[in-house]
Structure formats: C-alpha cells, structure tokens
Amino acid sequence: MESHHRKNRRVTSEKRQNGRIIGIKIKEFKEFCSKLNLKTRKTESVVSGLNNTVSNINSIVDVKIHSRINAFSTTLSCLLIDKITTNIPCVSFEQKNISIPPNLILADPSFNISAKIDMLIGADTFWNLLCIGQIKLGKNAPILQKTCLGWVVSGPIYLDKKSKLNTVCNLTVETNCDDALNHQLQKFWTIEDLPCKKYYSDEEAYCEEYFLKTSTRDETGRFIVSFPLKEPVSKLGDSRKIAERRFYAIER
C-alpha cells in the first residue's frame, strides 16, 4: 500500500461484489494512517457474512497496493474494521511439505506462517489479478496460481492430526445503509398494514353487508354502528335475575 511510504501487508481474497476491507484496531488506526499519510472519509456501510453476521462500518480510505516483484500497482477504496478474520493459515507448517518449483517467485514467501490478515480484496479486483499460469501439485495438494502480485498457493495441505484446525470463510456482502433502511421500513409497513382478504365465509360476508346497511352518521359527525347478534335474543336465557343480583351487590 502506498501514499508516500510503502509497507508490506498480507492480503487475502473473498467472494464479494464490491469494495475491499482493511482490518485494523482502533488504537493502531491513527498511527497507521499517519505513517502512510492516508486520509479517511466517512461512510455508512453494512457488511454481512456467514450466518448473516452484520458489521456497521463508518470509515473508508483509499490505498495503493504494489507488487513486491514487479511494477504492478492499483488503487483500492477500502472499508476499515477492527479485525477481518483469524490468522491464516490456521497453523504454521513447513514449506518443505509442498513441492514448489524453485523458479517460481511467490507473492508471499512466508505464506506458510500463520499471521494476521491486513486486507481483504474483493472479487471485483481479485479476478483482474489472475494471470495465465497454474500448476496443480496433485490430488489433495495445493494449486499454484500466477497473479500480478506473484505466485500464490491455495488448496488443501496435509498437517499433523494433532494440529488444531479451524475453518475460515471469507464471504462478505456489502449493503448500502439506504437499502437496508428501506428494507426495514418495508417490513414495518407490511406488519402494520391491514390484511386484504379476498375470500369471506358466510358469516363474514353477512357482517360486512350488515355493517354497510346499518352504519350511519349523526348531525354531530359521530358514527352510529349496530352489531349483529349471532344468536336470536330468545336464546340468551334468563339473565335478568343474575344481572339484578350483581347490580344490588354493587350498591352495597
């Protein structure tokens, strides 16, 4: 990455539509930007990943990355977060376990050392980094891929069974805050909106018709609404005596 200074950084790629992400802790943030003379801008972005975990991001910075082995360079706009992912690879291993041709220049000579990931490159940039040239080291073995940054190593690697392994997923999706807000508002109005029922039972149809025929409005503007009785009045039973007893009990 470059402004007026250059500094080596470890990057990885992701399956993502737009943008890039830089992982840096807040306490390191000012020092990082000061050393590289980087100017940040405010933004409102929402990034979601596996299991729909969501991160709200409010800082963005432009950085220029260079290949350490050739003249390739490109400028990226990166979102700033505290941490991108766990160390990659999960555990360190010996390079002698992989038969890498000695004439290949690796983008990261220390790829076998478990270390922090400083930048996550989006899929829109990643595919433009690929060059013609690929070497398959065999079944259940890594693949060597030529890129503008040098050769990269990717794929399965045999490790001691005692080693503790973690699965890392670099899947993220960036969502504009306006889109997220619109989606939430749409859900709110859907929940609050009265249901539009197209089919009614006989009882519901009768109530609808009864309401339209009997509802009126007096001279003061108040509505007069009648309620239909489901059963005839004669089926109410002898409730007068019960009502009188309750009334007299209240008077006491």
Image (spheres, rainbow, N blue to C red):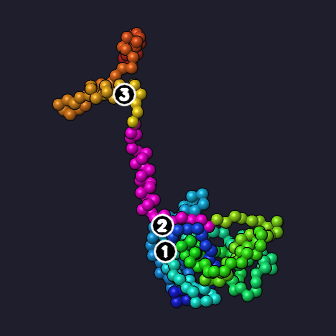
Residue at coordinates 45% horizontally, 70% vertically from top-left? Answer: 43
Helix, strand or loop at label 1? It is: strand
Q: CA distance from mark 1 to mark 3?
A: 59 Å
Residue 227 visible (yes or no): yes
Residue 249 visible (yes or no): no
Residue 71: x and y in percent read 58, 90
Residue at coordinates 69% horizontally, 83% vertically from top-left? Answer: 106
Q: Is residue 155 magenta?
A: no
Residue 189: x and y in percent read 40, 48
- Of 113 and 102, nearer the camera is 102
Q: CA distance from mark 2 to mark 3?
A: 50 Å
Left or right: 51 as drawn, with respect to 134: left
Residue type marked 2: Ser
List the residue tagged with mark 3: 205
Residue 4: x and y in percent read 52, 89
User: Which quadrant of the figure has residue 181?
Assistant: bottom left
| 10 Å crowding of disc 2: few (<14), some (14-19), many (20+) | some
Q: Are marks 2 and 1 in contact (CB under 8 Å)?
A: yes
Q: Is residue 179 magenta?
A: yes
List the residue tagged with mark 1: 60
User: In this picture, which residue range is highlighted in magenta?
Assistant: 170-197
Quarter of the figure with the N terminus: bottom right
